[in-house]
Image: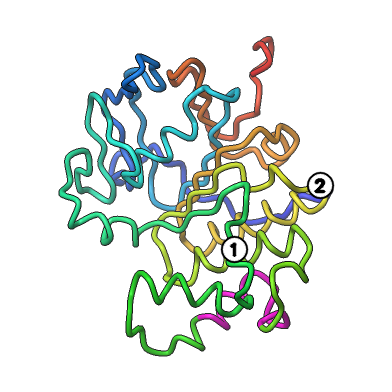
């Protein structure tokens, strides 16, 4: 696999920058007593590309769900774009979620809708009456390289193409932050690498990207910021990091 060469953003530690995402002493304990996150402190800055790594059950997906307020933190405070979301009223959640584009391991496409209809659906739900809908859908599909697949149905596409449709759907409303939760989990290595290159291009356009992944090879090749979670705690946060630090146990 060849590495996509893109200019690297400035280091996120610049104190003049305000985090686009920040966690302050965040914990999450479920009603059954399971603790998913413990005292998490982190800051993610505009234009960061961050890999979130850790074993299954370490807390990665919980962190993502807290960010979009699918779940509520038990302790601590979370800020998105300078706004505290920890106790945000439900009526304000749709506006918060418009800041995010989200893709998952399973593509969650509408099987009886065309590619164009799947992408358009995201705008129709979040921003009814959106002007220039057709043009925005075509632009999103052009970005992911599927401008010639508008009228195809999901079962006519490969797994990699389906994930690209999901990415286009997440991009069509031009989110400030892109969340990818195991986006290559169902894909072969070459297809996975194409998806990661696409996420790097999206990041290069100015979108902050947070990618939860088990894909060690990709993390080690790309060498961007790595946040490692173990037993609900952030145990490592390093720029140009690797999936595992030398001497670290397999996660």
Pointer 2 local density, CA inside 10 Å: few below 14, some 14–19, many at least 20: few
Q: Nearer the viewer, residue 105 or 220?
A: 105
User: Nearer the viewer's eye, disc 1 or disc 2?
Assistant: 1
Looking at the rendering, the stretch of residues picked out in magenta corresponds to 137-150
Asked if 106 appears above or below 101 in the picture, the reply is: above
Q: Residue at x 51, y 17 (%)?
A: 230
Tell me: 22 left or right of 148.
left
Residue 3 percent across, percent down from the top left: 76, 50
Q: Quadrant of residue 55?
A: top right
Which x, y percent locates residue 52?
53, 34
In percent of width and height, residue 217 lies at: 75, 35
| Residue 109, disc | 1
Measuring from the top left, give residue 17's x and y in whole percent.
31, 46
Q: Secondary structure at mark 1?
A: loop
Determine whether the residue tagged by mark 2 lies in a helix, strand or loop: loop
Residue at which label 2 appears: 188
**For the point 72% across and 45% down, which residue is it?**
186
Whether residue 142 is visible, yes or no, is no
């Amino acid at each position: 696999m060849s590495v996509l060469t893109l200019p690297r953003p400035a280091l996120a530690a610049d104190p003049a920058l305000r985090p686009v995402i920040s966690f302050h002493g965040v914990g999450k304990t479920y009603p059954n007593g399971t603790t998913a996150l413990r005292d998490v402190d982190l800051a993610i800055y505009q234009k960061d590309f961050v890999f979130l790594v850790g074993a299954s059950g370490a807390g990665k997906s919980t962190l993502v769900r807290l960010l979009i307020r699918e779940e509520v933190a038990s302790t601590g405070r979370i800020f998105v774009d300078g706004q505290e979301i920890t106790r945000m009223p439900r009526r304000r959640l749709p506006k918060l979620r418009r800041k995010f584009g989200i893709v998952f391991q399973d593509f969650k496409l509408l099987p009886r809708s065309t590619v164009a209809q799947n992408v358009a659906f995201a705008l129709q739900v979040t921003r009814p009456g959106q002007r220039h809908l057709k043009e925005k859908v075509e632009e999103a599909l052009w970005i992911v390289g599927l401008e010639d697949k508008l009228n195809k149905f999901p079962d006519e596409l490969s797994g990699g193409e389906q994930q690209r449709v999901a990415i286009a759907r997440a991009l069509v409303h031009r989110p400030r932050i892109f969340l990818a939760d195991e986006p290559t989990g169902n894909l072969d290595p070459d297809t996975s690498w194409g998806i990661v290159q696409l996420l790097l291009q999206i990041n290069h356009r100015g979108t902050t990207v947070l990618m939860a992944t088990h894909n060690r090879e990709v993390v080690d090749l790309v060498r961007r910021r790595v946040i490692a979670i173990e037993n609900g705690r952030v145990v490592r946060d390093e720029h140009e990091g690797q999936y595992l630090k030398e001497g670290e146990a397999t996660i």
